[in-house]
């Protein structure tokens, strides 16, 4: 009895089914890789915001109102802030010019077009390039409290002192992954996040995902000018 061979039509059907199966497996693998990328990026963004808040809080605690050469101690707007701080208090001498302090400048800037945070901390005279922190955000905003109301910008020279407090508001966004995904459950997020709307919010006044208000000690006068009597 002769074995029956496969016809050309059967071969074509088998090839077609194989290609469909291969395409489905490939599409599933790519979707899983993209979901993993979004989740890791969201986790990076959360860690970066925590780093920014912790660093800003440490420097604002020891911030000065201005340097001896007229650089504002706190200068900022909605998407950026610069802080001069002295990590080590200088020893007192009769000649203020001989007082040496550990003066540093912290600059934090949010890039709305890319969702990235730029941060640099170094000496006032230094020219170190800013680092781009990992992760991307929907938005990051700063506000400044003058003791009575919140301001969208601040200059400690023009305002004759430091703000009473600085507020940091952050919108993270959410990766587009299934709710039952184990990785998604590890990073509970509560706002929509997609490639099309990554850097847009439908409601400009929507509730931030994170708010931190940092109080500044002795922020009512220019007494903390570098080189002047404390």
Image (cartoon, helix red, strand yellow):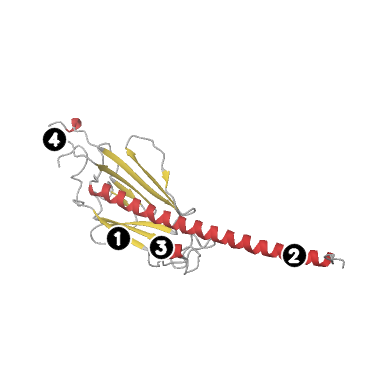
Counting residues from the N terminus, which is met first, the one under dot 4 or under dot 2? 2
Residue 39 x %, y %: 47, 59
Residue 107 x %, y %: 35, 45
Task: Count neighbours of disc 3 (C-alpha within 10 A) and say few if under 14, some if 14 to 19, many if 20 or more.
Answer: few
According to the image, label 4 marks what residue?
A: 92
Counting residues from the N terminus, which is met first, the one under dot 3 or under dot 2? 2
Q: Nearer the viewer, mark 4 or mark 1?
A: 4
Q: Quadrant of the C terminus?
A: top left
Of 5 and 212, nearer the camera is 5
Counting residues from the N terminus, which is met first, the one under dot 4 or under dot 3? 4
Residue 31 found in image quarter: bottom right
Query: Do labels 4 and 3 touch, CB within 8 Å?
Result: no
| Cα gap from disc 4 to disc 2, whole angstroms | 85 Å
| Cα gap from disc 3 to disc 2, whole angstroms | 40 Å
Of 10 and 185, nearer the camera is 10
Counting residues from the N terminus, which is met first, the one under dot 1 or under dot 2? 2
According to the image, label 2 marks what residue?
A: 16
Q: What residue is at 45 percent from the left and 53 percent from the top?
A: 135
According to the image, label 3 marks what residue?
A: 186
| Cα gap from disc 4 to disc 3, whole angstroms | 51 Å
Q: What residue is at 21 percent from the left and 42 percent from the top?
A: 225
Q: Nearer the viewer, mark 4 or mark 2?
A: 2
Q: Is residue 70 visible?
A: no
| Cα gap from disc 3 to disc 1, whole angstroms | 35 Å
Tag 4 secondary structure: loop
According to the image, label 1 marks what residue?
A: 150
Q: How many marks?
A: 4
Q: Residue furthest bottom?
A: 180
Tag 3 secondary structure: helix
């Amino acid at each position: 009895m002769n074995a029956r061979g496969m016809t050309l039509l059967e071969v074509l059907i088998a090839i077609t089914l194989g290609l469909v199966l291969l395409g489905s497996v490939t599409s599933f693998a790519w979707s899983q890789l993209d979901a993993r990328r979004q989740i890791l990026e969201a986790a990076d963004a959360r860690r970066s915001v925590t780093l920014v808040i912790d660093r800003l809080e440490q420097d604002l605690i020891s911030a000065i109102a201005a340097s001896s050469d007229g650089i504002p101690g706190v200068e900022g707007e909605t998407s950026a802030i610069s802080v001069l701080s002295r990590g080590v208090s200088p020893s007192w001498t009769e000649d203020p010019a001989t007082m040496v302090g550990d003066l540093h400048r912290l600059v934090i800037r949010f890039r709305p077009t890319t969702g990235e945070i730029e941060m640099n901390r170094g000496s006032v005279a230094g020219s170190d390039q800013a680092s781009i922190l990992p992760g991307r955000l929907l938005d990051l905003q700063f506000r400044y409290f003058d003791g009575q109301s919140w301001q969208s910008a601040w200059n400690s020279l023009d305002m004759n002192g430091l703000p009473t407090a600085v507020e940091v508001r952050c919108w993270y966004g959410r990766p587009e992954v299934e709710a039952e995904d184990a990785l998604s459950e590890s990073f509970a997020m509560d706002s929509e996040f997609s490639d099309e709307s990554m850097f847009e919010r439908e409601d400009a006044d929507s509730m931030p995902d994170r708010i931190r208000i940092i109080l500044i000690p002795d922020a009512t006068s220019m007494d903390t000018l570098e080189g002047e009597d404390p």
